[in-house]
Image (spheres, grey):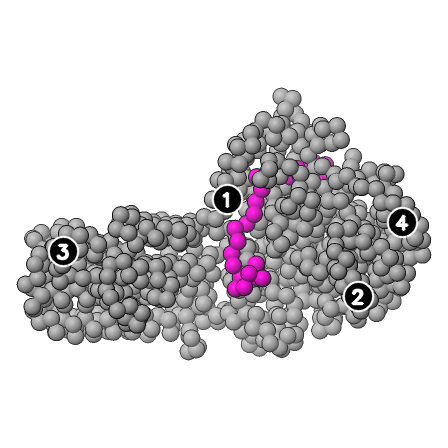
Amino acid sequence: MPSEATETPATSASVELNADLNADRSTDLAASTSGAAPVLVPWSELLDDHGEPRPGAEVLAAHLQRVTQSELQARQDQVDVDILANGITFSVYSDGRGIDRAWPFDVVPRVIHGREWDTIEAGLAQRLKALNAFIDDVYNDQRVIADGVFPAGLLADSVNYRPQCTGMHPAFGVWAHICGTDLVRDSDGVFRVLEDNLRVPSGVSYMLENRLISKRVMGDLFRSQSIRPIDDYPDALLSLLRSIAPDGSDPTVVLLTPGVYNSAYFEHSFLARRMGVALVEGPDLVVRNNRVFMRTIDGLRQVDVIYRRVDDLFIDPEVFNSESMLGVAGLMRAWRAGHVAIANAPGAGVADDKVVYAWVPDFIRYYLGEEPAIASVPTYRCLYEDERAFVLDHLDQLVAKPANESGGYGLCIGDRATPEHLATTRAAILADPRNWVAQPILSLSTVPTLTEDGVDGRHVDLRPFVLSGRTTYVTRGGLTRVARPKGSLVVNSSQGGGSKDTWVVEPSSSASALAG
Amino acid sequence: MLLSRVGGNLYWAARYLERAASAARIVREHTNMLIDMPINDRLTWEPLLSISGALDTYSTVHDTFDEASIIKWVVCEPSNPASLANSLEGARENLRSTREVIPTELWATVNDLFLYSEAQLDHAIERAGRARFCDRIVSDVQRCWGIVEDSMRRDEANALLALGRYVERADMTTRVLDVRAVGLMGEGADTPYVDLQWAGVLRSVSALQMYQRAVRSPVEGAEVIRFLMGDDAFPRSVRHNLAQLERITATLPRAARPLQACAHARAVLSSRWDQLTGTDPAGLRVALDAVQMAIGQVSDSILATFVFPDGNP
């Protein structure tokens, strides 16, 4: 079982992966770095050390042995044509006015064994319960601070803390209704949470499209094994959104998008279509008497639930960024008056912070009285002098991350950064230590990927999506992102990453298919 | 329930789509006809510019009216807002922000057509590839309307698409007559092969076959005008489109103003009927202008009522 492989002694890596810095801050940081760093061998998702398929991957491995490179390439070419014709695109800001790019999809899927997925699913549900409890606590009693679990100063400094949300009690105590959690599998085969995206996480539409595509080009492989279906996500999302409406009966739900030039517009449109709800932009909405209305050809119509894909700071010019053209003046008043539900709730991002991340295992213990069921990555907080000194001394062996950037921007991957980059990162950490954390350089697992030079391993991560409301829903699998250049660890689509379908294979269905 | 903004996008998407198809029909037919005509005849490529309203912009850049320059201008010139390429892009951009309300296949077809035209524009310039290019545009737009007919609920979104389509058709038919028919009357009646040219007028709105079935006599100028303006059953006749506009508008909420505009347009068509079907080219032109203006008022009232009810466009 991969999840038991964490204690491998070979990991006397530059930084001890299993050191739990949160449980005991006095950990002797220097002790874990003696000696030279061994080279970590990435975990292969398909084959074990003996070249045998991992559990669940039997059918795919056999298929990849059978199929020729040119057959695979022909399927890939067909996929590329379909993607372009169906307009499955994402936009890139830096291209100027948001140019469309075809969604990059790799035909070779990534496989996860069903039984292993069950434990991850439980771990994610547990994690989101704790995160929501934390957010609700932060905006109400702040017990977590009073009890000395979380430092008060950090909250005050957090760029995602919104005092305007204090005293609110969203339905079910849930603030982060939709979460996209990034997971990576380290060189020991352990899935670890890399970060929680609680603000406006995207990617789920690509997860769903990837499955549609792979059913078209790899349909035969679905016949010989049971792959858990994922297409019920939009229904689950709609049920969740309806369940948080202020008034129960037949609520009107809308999806608020920044507009057609947003990088995730395709997804906004996709989800609105799959849920049958209106896709609105800020100017389509208006607040009257603390109620939100949309402008229809039949006049104003009240809105009960807003699934907003606009960042907090832009949703209401009355309260936040007064220049924002993306939001709706008075939206916060309507929300506070209880006349409209917003998902994710304003302020939920307070737990979506690479510094707060370091405390999540503590939140799980504090709020739930449980041990974390899913591992996270040891995280050094530059806020603390000793951890900062350690980070600065080992910058070339760590990944340094600014706390509030997303999309991989601002990252400094120590062992491959230029001396200049290391120097500017060092200066940035010294200038604003609260805003920086560092983690050991993980060796992301690899999946066979079709490249120009044939099928070759490429690094992947995984973004499952978690819906929280009265109950919790976890996608079966998630969006697998792949770094396309050889050796690269950057999987973000905005920086050239690709994607794969993710198959959670029902236990034993894969092996028995071959045996039979 | 339909957002006003989305309603506006649907209306314009339909107009642009229909406009692209009209441009393709006209280019195809004009090419077809000029190949038939004796070389150095009076017939020129210039009407292509006039019909699409691009004569003025063209004249500021070019001083010759040769085939290649004009076709290029009408089909793919980026700075000509009425070019076929710009119409397709307009259709795609407007539909892109309405994907949640239209059938998936409609978006895919328009997107695919846009990508095709972008890649194949050069073929439209040479005579050899032009017909094939135009055929594809026309048939793909027909496919779009087929998808709408076949799979879309008759809801408000469907209505706004229909309004855009009918307004554009009525408008285009009057433009074609304005440019082509007026010239073929009066002195123009002595033009060689005048009947062939009247047939060309019909073809440029895909009306020849239906005309022949309905009229059952050789093609003749006055009958052509009568058919294209007044036939109550032909999909591109002005009367038919005005009736459709009125029927669709009546299904929408708060439609008093556009209904009034439709009734007015119908009244103009009736009151100008003698001028339209008379023998005086100047009278025909005046009457066509009046009808065109009334169609424009229908369009304005649709936008003002459904898209910008607060008055600020």
Q: Amino acid at mark 4?
A: Thr
Q: CA distance from mark 3 to mark 2?
A: 78 Å
Residue B39's disc number: 3
Q: Amino acid at mark 3?
A: Ile
Q: Position of residue A368 (x, y in %)?
A: 82, 53
Decide if residue B204 is on the left or right side of residue A408: left
Q: Which residue is mark 4?
A: A33
The quadrant of the picture occupied by the C terminus of chain A is: top right
Structural crowding at the residue carrying mark 3, measured as other residues with C-alpha within 10 Å and reported as few (<14), some (14–19) or many (≥20): few
- Chain letter behind tag 2: A
Q: CA distance from mark 4 to mark 3?
A: 89 Å
Q: CA distance from mark 3 to mark 1?
A: 47 Å
Structural crowding at the residue carrying mark 1, measured as other residues with C-alpha within 10 Å and reported as few (<14), some (14–19) or many (≥20): some
Residue A427's disc number: 2
- Say which element carries label 3: loop
Residue B187's disc number: none
Q: Position of residue A56 (x, y in %)?
A: 68, 32
The nearer-to-camera label among 3 and 1 is: 3
The quadrant of the picture occupied by the N terminus of chain A is: top right
Front in this rendered view, residue A138 or B191: B191
Q: Is residue A46 above or below residue A427?
A: above
Where does the magenta region start and end? Answer: A92-120
First-in-chain label (2 vs 1): 1
Q: Position of residue B133 (x, y in %)?
A: 31, 50
Q: Which residue is mark 1?
A: A80
Q: Amino acid at mark 1?
A: Asp
Q: Position of residue A91 (x, y in %)?
A: 55, 58
